[in-house]
Amino acid sequence: MRVVRLLAVGWLYHMKMISRSPFEGFGQVIWPLFFATVAFFVFRAGDSPRGLLYASLGAAVMGMWSATSTTAGGAMQRERWHGTLELLVATPPHFALVLLPVTLAMATVGIYSLGATLLYGHFLFGIELSVEHPLLFAGSIVGTVLSFGALGFAFAVTFVRFRAAWALGNLFEYPVWLIGGFLVPLLLLPDWVRPISWVLAPTWGMNAIREAAVGGSPLNDLAVCLGLGALYVLTGILITNRVLDAARRRAALSLS
Amino acid sequence: MAVVEAHDLKRTYRTHTGTIRRRVKEIEAVRGVSFEIAKGELFGLLGPNGAGKTTTIKMLITLLIPTAGEARVLGYDVVKDAREVRKRIGYVFGGERGVYERLSGYDNLRYFAELYGVPAREQKGRIEELLQLVGLRGREHERAEGYSRGMKQRLHIARGLLHDPPVMFLDEPTIGLDPVGARELRATISALADAGKTILLTTHYMFEADSLCDRIAVINRGQIVAEGTPAHLKSRVATGSVVEVEVYGVAEETVTRLKALNGVRAVSIEEREQAQVLTVQTDTGAQLTHAILGHLDGANVGRVSQREPTLEDAYVALVTEE
Amino acid sequence: MNSVRIFFVGGQITYRALFHWLTPQIYIPSLVVAPIFQILLFAYIGRSAGLESDEFYVVGNALQYAAVPCLFAMTQMVGGERYQNTLSAILVSPARRIPLFVGRAIPVVLNGAFVAAFSLAAGTAILGVDIPLSAVPALALVILVAAFSCTGLGLINAALSLRIRENAMLSNVLFGFLLIFTGANVPLGELPGWMRTISDGLPFTHAIEAARKLADGASLGSVAGLVGTEVLIGLAYAGVGYALLRFMEVQSRRYASLERS
């Protein structure tokens, strides 16, 4: 119970901080819209059975992923710059319980991007937003956010060793867009890529959201998505122990 | 049982230089530091910048792993039982950072209260109490980015006290504060000690160590060069006197020759605006003023005075000894 | 820390200290790996949507991605100096301005061209796109022109970034516009009229069209008009950028706002 409270409180305060820099958030939302625009034009002009709703949902999740991938990798580095990393490490709870809420908050910002993309598609390209199972749709979005936060957490503890940690996440923006099957069905990708897609939670989150929208059953996809998320957290925890130990040996917790 | 024990703590940093041929440089920041702090004591670790104070304190608060030696806080080993140690200590460092600027002071405290496991229903009350104690009442709902340096420092202290730890580690808490702010902070620290907390304070202000601490360890270049109560340290130089000479340019070799004089304990030079002040600590009775001035022949000499030694002189002597 | 993207990493490239600064850790992800992924992303989106060919997207994106080094590097060149307070030192020198800026722009153009050429080669190799070997020299020229043209825009971006704090975002927005309007991914015929008008005035639009024709086997002569237009566009942007920088130079002498205080 205390664990849940700890995660919730951490998430709340980091959300508060993130929402207080609207300019940053604005950039997060605008950036994916450029790609969404291209996607809408291309799918409108192309001749494939996958219509604009497909493109709209795909572009919306692209935005969600962007919000996480471009910020989460630098989470630990950012805390170090603020001088708060030391303080966080010096607290009793396991560091994973302290860092996970941070990346969860970053992933939550993706919901703004999702909403903005869907509205943009609706008002500027006339894409009908028909969602067959609204509750499951919302649930799928939440599940996707959770798994993105988990993956972001794994990024944060893995990248912290690199000076360019804040930029490394960007490296995963395009590839996940492609391999996650957001705008490209996995069948179109080379065979050897598919297993990689399958271990990426974003792939399953996307499926779940799509299924919920068109009236299929998202529950299996959602389960796999969350399961992978849990795996990322576990991996992150193991890495955290090693990283913090190394940092305490190398005196890398603070800037001075 | 001592509340804080350090046994022969050592800490070496390895830095890499160069990108083509990476060379490893080893810096020994702490070279065998040992001391003990009893319950309720306000213990000062006094030394110049780079002496190893911060490194020592970080080893004790589990943020740094010692290269050798061991330390315990309340009986718990700082490396093996880090979690137990963290539950029982508060850590405060001076400076502008370490505060979430976009949150209010109040929110900063709420966040850390949760991290430190302060029970939910007690949080509000504790925070109110602490805000009152550190004098941030009325400003607690403003964003921390608008706080002055002194206010941030006080917020640090409040944060360190949230879980009412029996042991507190204060790393140069008054650094960069204006005199009034610093004085108020010292009063707060004193009150904490009076309330029974065990405190380790690092500082490079000797008068601060003198006025606050029950006992002081002087640290220089990674080693403790003296330890004792302020009175004890003063007594090391109580015998003897200090000759101060205002000079305009004194050569390095003159200083060396002065140091070699019989009866001279320490020589140091301080830069003032237009001139330098040469301070020579001598044994009791040694009337060395003539000899000193003799060596300064050729240099422009201003005022000459002789006086009683202070704790500052003791400190300077300790940290300039080779 | 504002929301930075991989492109801000491109902006870290200060050419004065190019070899000292530019670690593989920064260069490879942002200027080697990312453009290849952008090409793959859009090629597959094209397949998914059933629009155009792989070649279409390879050529379009390889050229468009040159925007990253060209826009961000110029900004860093000017902004970087500002951060180091050397800009004013340079601006008060009696050195003639045009050679000064041209000198600084050349490495940017070359780097941009190199990035585009490399990603074009990689993209065609990976996706198995067929480009006649005879077209390569002409393509190289078109790529150079495209990089030059975008660097002109980069100069304007750099001038503006002296005033605007959030210049990383401005560069990202420009990148986004170039993604949509230049025909890199959306065939110009699919854009509404008013958008096509904008396209005609942007860098890359003509170069991309020329490059696609060359890749299909056209001769250099047949695309000369497009190439020439691209050059003119580049000169126009460069001219505006230069004027803007001089204007700001004068302004700053009046208001002492050039240095970051």
Image (cartoon, rainbow, N blue to C red):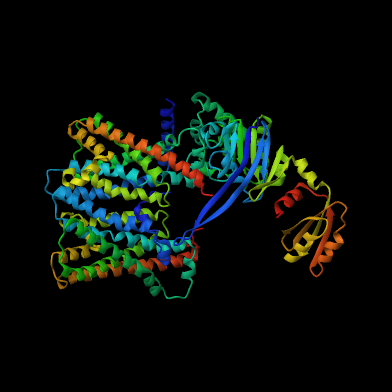
Rendered location of residue A156, percent (x, y): 39, 43
Along the line of sight, which residue is nearer the eye, B308 or B137? Answer: B308
Q: Where is residue C206 in the image (x, y as percent from the top left)?
A: 21, 65
Q: Nearer the viewer, residue B142 or B109?
A: B109
Q: Is residue B8 shown to the viewer in this render?
A: yes
Which residue lies at the image location 18% right of the left edge and 41% below the top edge? A53
Total marks shown come to 0
Give the residue drawn at x 85%, y 60%. Answer: B289
Lateral position of residue A3 relative to residue C176, left or right: right
x then y, percent, for residue C58: 20, 58
Q: Could you say which quadrant of the image residue B92 lies in?
A: top right
Rendered position, C45 above or below B273? above
- B87 to C77, vertically: above or below: above
Image spot of residue C7 (x, y percent): 34, 55
Q: Is residue C4 above or below residue C247?
A: above
In depth, the one of B278 and C11 nearer the eye is B278
Horizontal placement of B171 versus C134: left or right?
right
- The answer to whether residue A90 is left or right of residue C210 is right
